[in-house]
Structure formats: C-alpha cells, structure tokens
Image (spheres, rainbow, N blue to C red):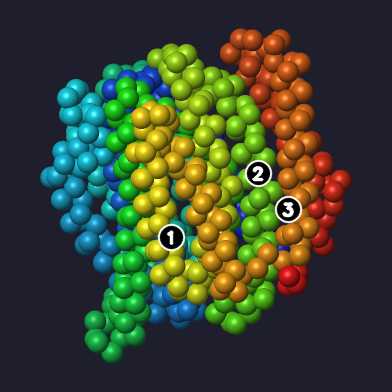
Amino acid sequence: MTKKSALINNFSIVGLWTLFSRILGFLRDIFLALFLGSGPVAQAFLLAFTVPNMLRRIFAEGSFNKVFIPIFIGVKGRKKNTNELVTIVFFSLFITLGLISILGVIFMPALIKALAFGFLYDERFELAVLYGRIMFPYILLISLVQLFNSVLNALNLYHISTATQGVLNLFLIGSLIFSALYSSDFGYNLCVAVLASGFVNLVMVFIACRLNGISLTSVNLSALNPNLSISKELFLKSIPISLASGVSQINLVVGRQISSLFDGAMVWLIYADRLAQLPIALIGVALNVVTLPKLSSLKKSGRKAEGNSYLNQSMQLSLIFALPASVGLIYLNSEIISSLFQRGNFLVNDAIQTSKALSIYSLSIIPISLQMLLLNFYFAEKNIRIPFYYSLASVFLNVSLAYTLLDIFKFLAPPIAYAITNWLVFISLVYHTYKFGFYFNSAFKRGLPRIVLSSCFMLILLILTKSFTLQYFSTQVLTILWLSMVIPLSGISYFACLKFLGILDKNFWVNDFSK
C-alpha cells in the first residue's frame, strides 16, 4: 500500500466513524432543542458537562495523545515493555484523576462560579452544581478511554478508537427519549447517561487492546526497570502539554463567562460551535489522528523529506474538505440552523442568534484544521516547547479580543475573537515552521489555487440556486428537503471541478519532495 493510499484509507476510517458520531450528535442536539430549548435546564446541563470535558482535554487528549504516541512507538514490538508502560500510565491516571474527581465534586460550586458568574442569581446555578457533581467522575473514565485509544491509534487500529465517539451520543439520545416518555427529569437522566457511556467506552477499548496483545500486567518496581524511566519521561513531557492545554481552556472559560451574561446565549454558542466543529472533527481531527503516528515513525527513522511530503499531503487533503465546508456553512447558516433546531422550545429568535454565531465560528474551520497538522511537525520530534508557547500566545490574544469586543458585539464577541485569533496564530505558525525546515512543496502550491477556484465555483452555484429556488421551499419541512438536495449537488459540483482541474489524479501530489 502506498503512503498516499494508506493515509486516505486511515483518514476514511476515522472520518466515517467521526461522521457517524456527529450525525448522532446532531440528533442529540435536535432532541435537546426540542425538549429543553434554550431554557435553564439546557444551559445548566451544557455548562456542567463543560467541566469534565475541559479537564479531559487537559489531562487526556492534551497530554497522552501527543506525547504518549511517539514514546509508545519507540517501545512498540516489545510486548512486555509495552504492557508495563501502559499499566504504569493507567494506574498513574487512575490515582491522579480519581483524587481530582473527589475534589471536583466537593468544590463544584466554585467551578461553576468560575465558568459562569452570570448564573449566580437564578436557578441555573443550583442546577449546574447538581449536574456537575453527578458528571464530574466522567473525567476519570474518559481519560482512561483516551489512553487506550492512543494505544490503538499507535497500532494503526482506528475502528474501535473512533467508534467509541458515538457511544456517548447514543446514551444521551436514549436518555432524552426515556425522559420524554417515562420521566420529566431530563437533566438528571442526562447526567446518569454520561457516566454510563463512560463505563461502556472503557470496557470497549480495554477489550480491543487485550485482543491486540496490550493489557494490564504486573510491574517490576525496581529502579532498574527502564519502563519506569520511560514513564517518568512521559509525565515530565506531559506537564508542559497539559499546561498548554489548560491555558487553551481559558478560551472556553471566557466564552462561557461572556455567554452566561445573556439569557440563552450559552445554548446558541454551543450549538453553533458544535456545527462548526463537525468539519473540523471530520477533517482536522481525523487527519491529526492518523498523521501523528506515521510522521513520528518517519522522523524517528531520519526520513525528513518523506515526512515533509506526508505532512503536505495531509494539509492538502485537509484543505480540500475544509474550504468548501467553511463556505457552505457561512452561506447556508440560517437555513441549516432553522432546519435542525427551530421546533418545540427552540424559538425563531434562538435560531436567528445561533445562525449568526455559526457563520462566525465557521471562519475558524480552515486555520484550526491546518494548525493541528502543523503542530504535529513538532510533536513528532517530541518538541513540546513551541506548541506550548503558541498556546500561551493564542489564549492571551483571544481573551484580550473577547473582552475588548464585548461592548460592541455582545454575545458574539467570543466567536469573533476566536476566528481572528486562529487566523493570526496559523499565519505565525506557518512562518515559524518554515524556519524549522518545513516547506509547502510544489504539489501543494499547484493544488491550492485549484481548490480555491473549485470552492468559488461551488459558491456561485449555491448563490444562483438559493436565489432562484429557495422561495418555493418556504416551510421548514420543504427547507429541509431543499437542503437535502442542494448540499449533495454542491458537493458534487465542487469535486467535479476538482476532477476537471486534475487535482484528484492519483499522481498529482504523491511523493513530491521538491520545493
């Protein structure tokens, strides 16, 4: 299998499972909007769920996805060593995050105050504290899941690690349906569903690892055991990455604080952000997952030119999907939001405000997707200092802009600041990475204008189609039908243009090491 076909095959596996999970996520959000609208229970649940998710990104995704995989690849092939390493990391996480879970339950009121001071004087505060205390142990469960997912990704086994993404959404949808039919306590049932999904996910990935020869084992605690020193290296390198992830979560905190000042805004921003995150997850995250292990192997073996070519392939593939996704979400924002959410307790004003936020968040799809891949250039070499500095800079810029723009743009200040920050950081990162030996090869440079031209062609067709046909699809049901026809047709026109311009030819950008 060629490097290109391996990249596309692995990307397809991760992308399809991620798409399945995100479709379930849309169904979950549709049910949430239908039953809870933008009311206090929805706001309290979404805020409370932010807390364990935020810490998960700090302790699990931030640390072990970037640092663990290159280290694990270094010991892969020696079964006893790999099992010992996984065991040490597992119990270290279990003890550390178990203690954090206990502290989080005790100090939940302070956490909620820090995240949303706008909740302090109404019922949302007590609800958020209750829901947060129920869900907080999810951080322990999902962090252990992420550890085993990292092992599976390092082994190039992406089916189970990505399939687990949909389990949470299935449990939440089931909880909403159960609550509507048999119980009116939507918030409590949603919190229990979150915990249950964490247990099921942990069992799934643990069994998958065991079937592939990775399991928990006894550990030789002698100081001469090399796995102890490797584990120490892992945790020492994880500290700055965790700090960087923790610093980046300040962006999330600021967004929640500002949105809590406006009734309903937290729900509007969260729903809009989730829609904008769909292409980021399908493109940026999926490519990020499959690129890091391969790039680490190429860097380790000294094949830097091949590594650069592989990174160029990944970035071009990312741009092929990210650019039209951004264009489509910006232009069709109101039709998409009203079709998905405007029903039940989610009213017309909710849809209008969410549409505005979606168009702004969609501006960040391209820079975020490409940033992830560029940062892998450093993580593959176990260089964590530069990503840490970029995290600090992006947070400082984002927070400064968000509060500066608050008086002018109100609840839209966070997404506007977020978009500006991501573009500035991406441009700076490209310049900096060039100084460390990365370059856009000739294939990428040939492909970029063709991708832009194809996206412009798609946008012109969208403008013409919307201008001449949307007026005949005025009801919500007909608008959904219109979108179901227009979105596939615009995608077909886009890829047809790419094909006409030759960019989809299998020899167009394979193994190009030239500048």
Residue nearer the viewer, 199 or 99: 99
Residue displayed at 29% across by 24% down: 41
Residue displayed at 62% across by 55% down: 11
Label 1 Cα neighbours within 10 Å, binned few <14 / some 14-19 / many ≥20: some
Is residue 368 among what the camera can see? no
Label 3 Cα neighbours within 10 Å, binned few <14 / some 14-19 / many ≥20: some
Is residue 409 among what the camera can see? yes
194 versus 391 height, above or below = above
The residue under label 3 is which amino acid type? Answer: Leu
Residue displayed at 48% across by 30% down: 357
- Image disc number at residue 323: 2
Residue nearer the viewer, 310 or 200: 310
Describe the element under mark 3 as helix, strand or loop: helix
Taking the image as shown, residue 386 lies to the left or right of residue 374, namely left
Label located before the other in sequence (1 or 3): 1
Gap between marks 2 and 3 measured at Cα: 10 Å
Gap between marks 1 and 3 measured at Cα: 25 Å
In the picture, the quarter occupied by the C terminus is bottom right
Coordinates of residue 274 in the picture (x, y in percent): 47, 36
Label located before the other in sequence (1 or 2): 2
Coordinates of residue 425 in the picture (x, y in percent): 50, 54
Label located before the other in sequence (2 or 3): 2
Label 3 belongs to which residue? Answer: 448
The residue under label 1 is which amino acid type? Answer: Tyr
Coordinates of residue 381 in the picture (x, y in percent): 50, 75
- Tell me the quarter of the picture where residue 256 sits: top left
- Image disc number at residue 390: 1
Taking the image as shown, residue 57 lies to the left or right of residue 442, namely left
Q: Residue furthest bottom?
A: 224
